[in-house]
Amino acid sequence: MPTAVKFTEEERKPERTTTCFWKERRRHARQVLKTYIEGTCIIICENPSLPSQTVEMVSYKRLSPEDVQFSNAAASEEAPVQEMEEGKDPEETERPLLPRRPSCSATTALISLGFLLLLVCGLWLLVTIFWLQAPSNSVPHRAPPPRGSPGTGGGDGGRALPEPQACGVVPEAWRFDCYPERGVVVTRELCEARNCCFIPASSFSAPGRNGVPWCFYPPGFPSYSLVSVKATELGQTGTLVKTVKTYYPKDILTLHLELLYETDHRLRVRITDPSESRFEVPIAVPKATEKASSPAYSVELSNEPFGIIVKRTSTGAVLLNTTVAPLFYCDQFLQLSSSLSSQYIYGLGEHRSSFLHDIHWNTLTMWARDVPPTELTNLYGAHPFYLAMEEGGTGTAHGFFLLNSNAMDVALQPGPAITWRTIGGILDFYVFLGPDPASVIGQYLEVVGYPTMPVYWALGYHLCRWGYGSSNATWDVVKNMRNYGIPQDVQWNDIDYMDRSLDFTFDPATFSTLPDMVKDLHSHGQRYVMMLDPGISSIQPEGEYWPYDEGLRRGVFINHTDGSTLIGKVWPGLTAFPDFSDDVTHEWWYDNLKRFHDKVPFDGLWIDMNEPSSFVDGSTVGCPDTELENPPYTPGILGGLLRAKTLCASAVQKTSSHYNMHSLYGLLEAKASACALKRMLGKRAFVISRSTFPSQGQYSGHWLGDNRSHWKDMYTSIAGMLTFNLLGVPLVGADVCGFSEQTEEELCVRWTQLGAFYPFTRNHNAIDQKPQDPPAFSPLARSAMKQSLLLRYSLFPLLYTLFHRAHTHGHTVARPLLFEFPKDVRTYGIDRQFLWGKSLMVTPVLDPGVDFVVGYFPQGLWYDYYTGDSIRSKGEELRLKAPLEHINLHLREGAVIPTQRPNTTLFVSSGQPLHLVSSLSEDGSAGGELFWDDGETSDTLETDQYAHIVFTVVKNTMTSEVLHDHVEASYITVETASFYGVKVEPTRVTVNSQDAAFTYRANQVLTVTDLGLNLSQNFTISWI
């Protein structure tokens, strides 16, 4: 076995040679530390008593220095560097490691040449074998065949070690980690104690990443067997049995399998404990009533070892194959592995990363945590759903959703393969067949719920900061925005508006004019949103703080196991935490909101710190030493403990323990908040939440957390925005200009341009930072920001219609290019550009000091949004001019988008005349739509209080068709229409058969003006 050696920081430097020592029981043998490779020590043991191939590697990357110990007591003694045996000749002792070379002769030369040729051939053979087994960067490995049957044996320690030959045939890309625990020096002894293979990897991991596992499951590792199966009305059921226990406690040896063929494009699989009920996520999902008649999938079951193989019937592509690694089902450790159909994996929120996930030994941990966006860290929300683009450029896609809320690791590896490790609940998962990526998302949202239709002003510009200091200072910012004519719909306040950071209060000294400011906002068609944290102060004198006193009386707070109220610490000091899984808490929350609304008539809620976050681990009195606090396996969560900067995992909630409910906290608070606002205001609710979980979009939007004023943060916000659109939370955006650290003027201008195309756009920064609202900058920067926001407001009819599609069909609003061009593999990794809907492409500047940007244009005809100039692309990157005041927008051929004359609030803008922009395809056709209602009444679609108009262009004629009419449509008119790509200059234009004035430019743009058409009536515009 290798000797683990402590290294100082100086010794860890690369390209440094040193000498290590290894000590047997009866003698010393020198080891030579040959080299360092990126901080990894390769130790070659020159010990005559050991086989010559005994070579081990020890990587300190996965260890802390304190964890590294010698393997036994004797080895911890200092080995003497200059030790000589008694009677030994000093010259012999000091001879070089390599003996002196004898004089050269012909015989010696021939022998040396032959040896050299033999060495070269051997090296070539080794390199060839490694190349054949190494993962490819372009073509994924095929999954190995199903594992062999488990051998017989007794309990945990009674199995024979795997044969070395069996271990050696497992390619590195398909090694499934048998020892995933963090902070452990995985030695051969530890690995083989689990009856797993131990082979040092031939490659090294990137900093902060896991690498190829040295300890992995051998073929034939014991798993479950399928001992019975029968058909049911909805699919199949079966019984799984395991005879050999695992190395985790409380194996569940008999399991119930349920296959539900719910729809032609949705398969559900449930694996449960038939003898005892286990926690299941308390969100509503559809219940199938009949079996799919023509499923797009086939299901094969492997009996021994048990596994599920799901294939696409049309292509035979394997979408799921769980035979690649053993199934684990213990009380606090459930593990399921599967091959992946390709390396193109998206979703799996919430993490800071590129939009396309890296599958090269990338472990994503899910457990809601208060931490600024950081790579390789579990962030605010948990979303165990992925979208996969299938191999071959066919454009087909599928999705996978594990309905589980417990802490988990999701390990991606280059096989390609995935492993789900969760520490509770059940295995309840769905496979969505698509077949295109947009259909996959729609099918996923059919399960977790379509997003809510936002109130109209939610789509305007929002302004906030932590540290305005007073209501008058906040008010002054609003007035400055008005004076400069810069659009703003909503003003926010962070926690500094509160009296001593107490929820449902405002500071009577510094924010005494807050009610007057809100009244002024309303008189100008603007809205007010305030922050609320879930932590309720528990240290106010009895009778002086109604939220806590009443909460205690009603029993709404989360408790310790002994029934006492769990106390943590947040901004107001010691705090209790409402249990939003209890309906009683929802009523208490409503009462508190109503009481405060009577004083300050706010319009929406910003719910922060709802992971939930606490400044102490667990509680002020600690947490009990139980299995819930210290499970046998802890995923790679920040802090290493489930209770790190949150509540005790053992804390008691109405539905279950916090161990099970933790990552649901933000979802349940958002539900309570949205229901309270809707009940209180009688309109659509506006809620923005930091912590999220599947089905969140039904109740709230999301902002991407406490980012930094860095160019990289601006870039990564696009991936975050696109990912949350996949996850069913389309009302999403990042803090424009950055939250923490001081922004720069150029960065803020470019970020405002990008932010104008976030579905939710808000400028927000931290306390003690300089102001970064638009009036705070130079006239040039201020003008550029203003133009960006006016551009957004002009596109409001398009954006509002896209949210209607999201609400009714589960479509994305901000959309990755691959959704519209799924057969173009070059779009799969693009996250520096995006689309609004299917037609409007945004190419922002994301780098400092440049006046151009490079964008990829998929094959087809594109038009410059501003000028109508056309671009015919073969699928290529183009360099675009991008001066500081400009963001590049392009329209895809075949679209009709409704725009509007902008104003400083959407209340005013939404009543302005429309301008229709048509981007004609090569054959002169185009199409689009407009959804319109009063912008704030709930359920207008369900109650027929809306207008829906479809626009079509065919053969030189635009036709509008009112599919559903409503009085709201009669309040606005169509004033102008532009047609990009009219190849021949018209001689005559008619509107409803009447001649109309028009202009035609050399770039083939036809514009018809002074239309005055009633939107609620059908019309035609023709040209000849």
Image (spheres, grey):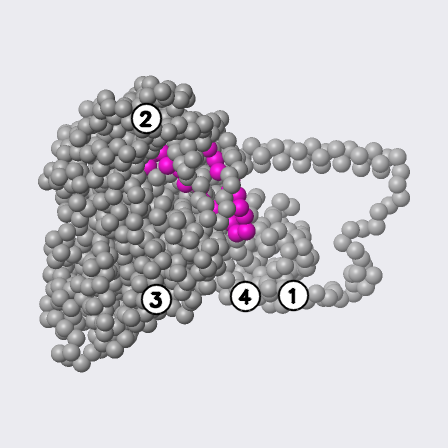
In the rendered structure, find residue 160 and report the number of the disc placed on it: none
Left or right for 452, reference 125: left
Give the secondary structure at mark 3. Answer: loop
- The answer to whether the residue labelled 1 contacts the one labelled 4, judged by CB atoms less than 8 Å apart, is no
Q: Earlier in the sequence, mark 1 or mark 2?
A: 1
Can the viewer see residue 1002 in this picture?
yes
Q: Is residue 845 magenta?
A: yes
Q: Is residue 679 magenta?
A: no
Label 4: which residue?
73
- Give the quadrant of residue 514: bottom left
Above or below residue 767? Residue 910 is above
Q: Position of residue 412 (x, y in %)?
A: 42, 43
Label 3: which residue?
466
Give, as a three-letter code, the residue at label 1: Ala
Label 2: which residue?
926
Can the viewer see residue 341 in this picture?
no
Give the secondary structure at mark 1. Answer: loop
Q: Position of residue 845 (x, y in %)?
A: 48, 46
